[in-house]
């Protein structure tokens, strides 16, 4: 999982087979949640008023979002939220 650095939800948990890497919120203030599951991609805003969600079922879009996830995963260091490309 990749999450904003100010998000205490879903930390790394070996018991739950989950590793979380964090994006520095001050530099990159994401305002939506993205979930990828094969050819499904969900996009959901964090707005409390008038939230918006979109579900996309398309293999190519799912694969491209997975590529973006993998890229970001490789750029982020475990537990620090630091981007290795910024060093």
Image (spheres, rainbow, N blue to C red):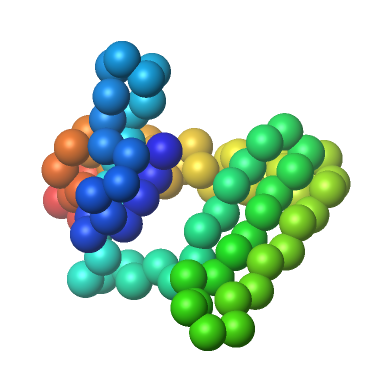
Residue most toward the front?
A: 49
Residue in the image at 22% along x and 34% along y: 78
On the image, the x and y values in percent for residue 66 come to: 60, 40
Residue most toward the right?
A: 58
Quarter of the image where the N terminus is located: top left
Quick check: 62 left or right of 2?
A: right
- The answer to whether one can see residue 38 in this image is yes
Q: How many marks?
A: 0
Quick check: 64 left or right of 14?
A: right
- Which quadrant would residue 55 be assigned to in this image? bottom right
Residue in the image at 67% along x and 36% along y: 37
Residue in the image at 27% along x and 37% along y: 11
- The answer to whether one can see residue 83 in this image is no
On the image, the x and y values in percent for residue 12 come to: 27, 30
Residue most toward the bottom?
A: 49
Residue in the image at 60% along x and 83% along y: 50
Quick check: 46 left or right of 29?
A: right
Image position of 11 with respect to 31: above or below: above
Q: Nearer the viewer, residue 64 or 53?
A: 53
On the image, the x and y values in percent for residue 72 come to: 42, 46
- Which quadrant would residue 54 be assigned to in this image? bottom right
On the image, the x and y values in percent for residue 40 come to: 75, 43
Quick check: 78 left or right of 1?
A: left
């Amino acid at each position: 999982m990749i999450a904003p650095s100010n998000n205490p939800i879903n930390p790394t948990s070996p018991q739950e087979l989950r590793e979380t890497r964090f994006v520095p919120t001050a530099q990159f203030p994401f305002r939506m949640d993205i979930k990828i599951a094969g050819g499904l991609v969900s996009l959901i805003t964090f707005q409390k008023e008038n939230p918006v969600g979109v579900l996309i079922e398309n293999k190519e879009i799912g694969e491209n979002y997975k590529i973006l996830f993998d890229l970001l995963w490789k750029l982020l260091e475990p537990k620090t939220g630091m981007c290795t490309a910024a060093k």
